[in-house]
Amino acid sequence: MTLVNDFSDVNKYKILIMIENGDDLGKVITAINDVKSCEVMGITDPVQMTNILQNDHTYDILVMHCADELRDTIETVKAIRKHNTSIFVILLTNEYMSIDDMDSLARYNVQGYCKDTGDLDELKIWIHSGIRILEQTKMLKQLYVQTKNQAETIKTLNTKLSSSYYETIDTLRKAVDKKDPYTRGHSDRVGYISAMIAETLGLSQDEIDMIRLGGQFHDIGKIGIKDNIITKPARLTDEEYEEIKKHPIIGFELLEKNNIFKDILPAIRSHHERYDGHGYPDGLKGNEIPLMARIVCVADSFDAMMSKRSYRDKMDLEYTMNEIDRCKGTQFDPKVAEAFKVLMKTRYDEIIAITGEY
């Protein structure tokens, strides 16, 4: 079965979609109707897909449904990569993958994956991300040809490659927020509030900007936590809580291998450490906890209390501020908590605007 859907400027980007269920294939094509400047071809036969990509290297993006057995999908990707190394591969999965599964797929240059949900918002995000990365890659090749062997070219190439990697990880960050409708926008809010606390503490602009990024990416490790835990409409069991406590390490291991994220790793790994030493994952205490993480901890806790959850309503502002004051010296760094109280007095309207904007 083959379905073709043409958009404006059809020669710009070609997308091949392979889903064996014809009804599901039609739904996916319909869902990405608003992706502009693309030609979409949909097929239901995996053998046909492999043959097409062996002989036609004009496709830019492949969207493929992941087989029930991951090793079968890996074998299919290996066969494709023998003949086509440049196509941007996105997998549609029935469940979110573990960090080990993502590592396995990354070895064969699978750039992204997303869960097959009803509205397929994550897939559209990945396709837009793929297009941006493809555009940047074309620019890199043009720059290299035009200014080969020039030092400035190498610097530009590195910058663009870092930008491409950032785009991919930022897509994962947004996918984390989309897992739970009750926490959408949480990471953006934590980033902005963290930056405002840093500014109140008198930190430099470079430090403020880095802390904003740390706040935005602090929960990236939740991409490796099962959906039924993230979205559970009740309080977690002890076993589920132990599972979700793994997300700082998952996020740290996901980003530690790329230098562009090295400065924000403390926020990712240590935002659940407590000032009294009873936090996780490392049991750090006091100033052993990086300042970035101590700041993000306060911003994260404030936004969590001020957000509606599936198992409780949001808490009122007075209660939230009393909790932050009560937990000074135990959960929170007293200086950071005091800075946040000053911030709430001096820039209250901005904080409330942020909580409503994202």
Image: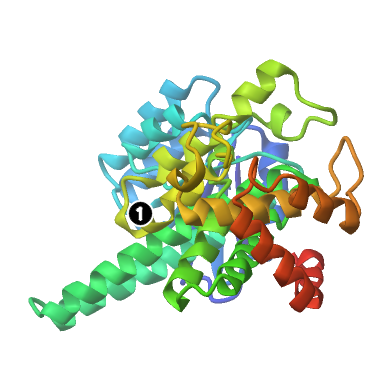
Instruction: Please tell me in which quadrant of the rendered image residue 279 appears.
Output: top right
* Residue name at image x 67 percent, y 24 percent: 241
Q: Quadrant of the N terminus?
A: top right
- Left-right relation of 87 to 286: left
How many residues crowd mark 1 within 10 Å: few (<14), some (14–19), many (20+)? few
Residue 94 visible in the current orientation: yes
Horizontal and vertical percent position of residue 355: 78, 64
Horizontal and vertical percent position of residue 96: 59, 33
* Residue name at image x 70 percent, y 34 percent: 230
- In the image, residue 187 sits, relative to residue 272, either above or below, namely below
Residue 198 vs residue 228, the one in the foreground: 198
- Left-right relation of 292 to 5: left
Amino acid type of the residue that numbered disc 1 sits on in the rendered structure: Lys
Horizontal and vertical percent position of residue 263: 38, 58
- In the image, residue 89 sits, relative to residue 283, either above or below, namely below
Residue for badge 1: 262
- Left-right relation of 71 to 18: left
- Left-right relation of 202 to 119: left
> How many numbered markers are drawn?
1
* Residue name at image x 49 percent, y 56 percent: 292
